[in-house]
Image (spheres, rainbow, N blue to C red):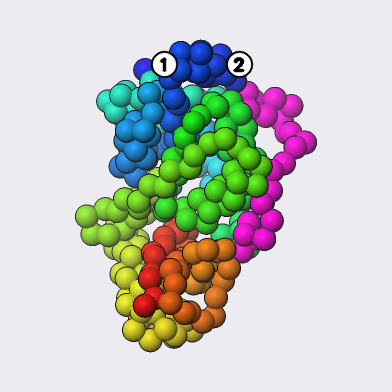
Amino acid sequence: MKLIRTVSDMQKFSLDCKRKNQTIGFVPTMGSLHEGHLSLIRLAKKRSDIVVVSIFVNPLQFGKGEDFDKYPRNLDRDAELLHKEGVDVLFYPSVDEMYPDGKILTEVYVNKISEILCGKYREGHFKGVTTVVSKLFNIVMPDIAVFGKKDRQQLFIIKKMVNDLNFNIKIIEGEIIREKDGLAMSSRNSYLLDEERESALMIYKGLKNSVDTLKKTKDVEKTKKEFIKYVESSPLNSVQYIEVVNSKDFSIVEEVDRDLYYILTAVFVGNTRLIDNMEVEIE
Ligand code: AMP
């Protein structure tokens, strides 16, 4: 596996692949890799000749007081995992390489859907995401890029950005990979103390109940209330939001018809903020 640390070397490598008619599959990550990330890499490998994974903890998408400094970083372990998966290139730029003067003046922003749910509570978060993903797309120049449904809102925003700005890149969606008991895998799970880990499982169980309740009653308000009551029955949990959105335009709904919806939530378990979501088909 090749380790590339500069923008120009990465672009050179990608142009070389293109000259050889090799397709590039790209998986952007912030590292501290787990099976969720590896499942995306396997999807990329199936669909392209060359697989590039980036590890970049992007300061632009962390707000003041968020966990940028303490975000788990473990390059040696990550590189070993990527090597085992048969990844061709690890792109691992420094913050200075990505933002040479400490900041950049150009921003990429997807209106409306960046302002709700996580966007409402993490100001500037999605602007940071879409800006860095645009940069990474121009640096890696992939044919396909793989994103996980775990970050459902991010996935929807990126697909909208790719469509609106005519990036010639196919976005592939990876299923949410969960621990055996159901907790969605996340690099942030490593923050959880033992009793918080137990409490965090209620997010998964609560979402499963919500899917059943919404299917049965079609009552959005009742579904949300039940979720909050159940999850917050643990004193360690505090629900930041629970919403139902339409799968077509990602608008928050108060009522449901026959259609596909997503139920999305963010929950603080102690000081750790976790997100999760599930699909629900209303018949
Ligand atoms: P992150 O390193 O958290 O920025 O995530 C990098 C990519 O991995 C994103 O596309 C995430 O949606 C995806 N991802 C993170 N956790 C999971 C998971 N449990 N299952 C599937 N994909 C995931």
Q: Which residue is mark 1?
A: 2
Query: Can you tell which quarter of the image residue 182 is in?
Result: bottom left
Query: In terms of secondary structure, where does tag 2 sit?
Result: helix
x and y percentages locating residue 9 in the rendered image? 56, 14
Query: Can you tell which quarter of the image residue 233 is in?
Result: bottom left
Residue pushed farthest right? 105
Q: Quick check: is 103 in the magenta stretch?
A: yes
x and y percentages locating residue 44 in the rendered image? 38, 34
- Amino acid, disc 1: Lys
Task: From the viewer's side, name the closer residue of 196 and 231.
Answer: 231
Residue pushed farthest front? 21
Within 10 Å of the Cα at label 1, are there few (<14), some (14-19), or many (20+) other Cα atoms? few
Q: Main secondary structure of the magenta part?
A: loop
Rendered-image quadrant of the N terminus: top left
Q: Quick check: is 37 in the magenta stretch?
A: no
> Which range is magenta?
95-117
Residue pushed farthest left? 180
Query: In terms of secondary structure, where does tag 1 sit?
Result: strand
- Ligand 1 near label 1 (Cβ, under 8 Å)? no
Q: Which residue is mark 2?
A: 8
Q: Residue at x 69, y 56 (%)?
A: 111
Q: Is residue 183 left or right of residue 107?
A: left
Q: Residue at x 47, y 56 (%)?
A: 152
Mark yes or no: residue 281 visible: yes
Q: Residue at x 70, y 25 (%)?
A: 100
- In this picture, is 21 found above or below 164? above
